[in-house]
Amino acid sequence: MRPIIRWALAFAVLVSGVFVPAAAQAAPVRSQAAVPQFDQQVLFNPHQETGYACFRIPAIVRSTHGTLLAFAEGRRDNCGDTGDIDLVLKRSTDGGQTWSPLQVVNPGGGDTHGNPVPIVDSRTGRIVLITTYNKGRDDDKACDVPCPRTPHSQYSDDDGLTWSAPVDISAQAKLPAWDSWYASGPVHGIQLTKGRHAGRLVFGVNAERSDGTNSIENYGALIYSDDSGRSWHVGAVDSYPHPVGGTYAQKPSEVSVVELPDGTIYAGGREQGGTDVGNRDYALSRDGGQTVSKRFTTIPDLVTPMVQGSLLRLQRPGGERILSASPSDTDRRRWMMVRSSYDNGRTWEDAEQGTRVTGDWSGYSDLVQLSGPADRDAKIGLMYEGGAVDARDEIRLARLDENYLGWRRSAGPTTPDVSRPGAVAYVLGGASVSHGALRLDGVDDFVRVPFSPAQLPGSGDFTFTTSFSYGASKEPQALLWLGGMGTTAPQLWLRGEPASHRLIAMMTTAAGSKSVTTAQAYDDQQWHHLALERTGGRLEIWVDGVRAASGPDSPGSVSETVSFQLQLGERLDGVNHFAGSLDDARLYRRALPESEVDAVAAGRTVWPGPVARLPFDRVR
């Protein structure tokens, strides 16, 4: 069952404030405890609170007394990032069933007080709250560059009922060079439990340095305290120059942290437009957050748009599991999803294995464990921005358990990828082999090829080949989709459009988009062999050994910056399903001469070989 269907079943039984079974039609279970649990409710909505135009930027923690503290930015005048913004709070003493009225913890007073990072000190019970300030604007435009921003700290010793006055900690938690930008979190911070740094409080920041006019260098960093938040220190710092008007490899931002079983700190960040493939990145610190052990590196196949994400390592008996929450569409903020890593962040579930919490628009998030460390079936709270119209419509809390998330869910049936030993592609939706080819139903069938660095065409030549047969539908039908999606994301795609009597291929790079179209759609339900090539500055389509379309390409890389996906039979957002058959799909990182295209059409091998080859001779 695909995640959106699974979510729909759960949504049908939502009961606000009551933890209920997620799907009455689920498979039989041995005990009530094994029934998946899910509910959700609205925590912050401007139509339900006086004096606010918008609520954004959730953060949530569970105190040592079991109280939930849900923080948000209360934006008074508009939904912009730099206006009159209060830091607000609601509390729950019954596990999230009911909530206190809104409480202003840190009033903006015309300025921006945001980026909440709550941290619970388990030794003292103190709740520390980090925020970041900047001078407010009267409009919803961005902060001028450079934008001086200052971190502040305050605390509560009575479970969040009252709070100390905020204190400027710039001298401790910010380097003098960070003059252009500074952002705490936004997401909960952690307390270390392992080794000689046990008890240390840690949170992530990103910052920027300017030349007085433009931002020229980015920093991802960890800030720590060894005295329950009374003083702070800048610890691990990773920096990346980004020259004005030029490109840069990475720009980690909005850092969320977890402690791994050996005490290593895993810092996961939003990747902000670097050329390295992927919209998420991570770094490691093995000395309690004082230095960087592994520099920030992108995660190419953790598919999410450019947006903040949250992390939570579950504390309960059983195997290791880290949760990651973020939207799961490739380019738009929608489809909030929880994905798992069972190997301490080395690999993550893909979008078919993760659990979609909503089909609505969605944005920033935070995760909290609702259950105690002795409970085997962990209960989890996901606080996230969501809305039917806009991700910023409201802030919700979803409560779910591990049974709802599932455990090590299969990515689906596979078909061999014979380009390298042991490789496979996932055959999803129910597609099957018929008469020696893969038959796709045009409803929900498609093929996902797992990421390998070898697949990245970059700015070089490439060739995609396949045999295809279709014609039962006049709807647009994707044969290939590679890279990202959207008007500017680097990508390459090929689609049949029978109603327009054409095949169309489009490539997008930083230089723009170029497309080529054929004079017919080849939708006669007969077999045809196709080759899509980038060769010598041109984009070409060959069908049955004849050049059917040719035009100039768009210079630059089709595989940079965004999360990378390689799919057959479906557009990346789940539409344009192919209704027909595909056979022997191959991807080469070079332009094949005409003689080699003919050899491939005849089923022969040519060298250098493909970086992906799917014979579609079996699915299992």
Image (tube, rainbow, N blue to C red):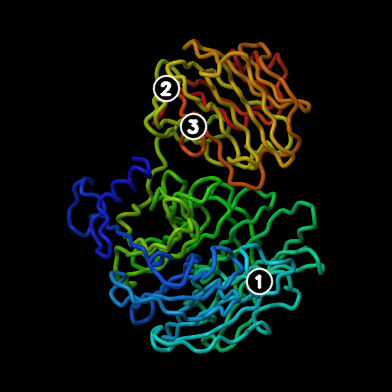
Q: Amino acid at mark 3?
A: Glu
Q: Quadrant of residue 437?
A: top left
User: Looking at the image, is mark 3 or mark 2 earlier in the sequence?
Assistant: 2
Per the image, the residue denoted by label 1 is 182
Q: Amino acid at mark 2?
A: Arg
In the image, taking residue 307 as reference, residue 93 lies left or right, namely: left
Q: Which mark is residue 255?
A: none
C-alpha distance separating marks 3 and 2: 13 Å
Please report the residue visible at 63 percent of the width from the left and 33 percent of the height from the top: 492
In the image, taking residue 154 as reference, residue 558 lies left or right, namely: right
Q: Which of the image's four quarters has the N terminus?
A: top left
Per the image, the residue denoted by label 2 is 439
- Secondary structure at badge 1 equals strand
Q: Is residue 274 above or below residue 591?
A: below
* Circle 1 residues within 10 Å: few <14, some 14–19, many ≥20: many
User: Looking at the image, is mark 1 or mark 2 earlier in the sequence?
Assistant: 1
* Proximity of marks 3 and 1: CB atoms separated by less than 8 Å: no
Per the image, the residue denoted by label 3 is 570
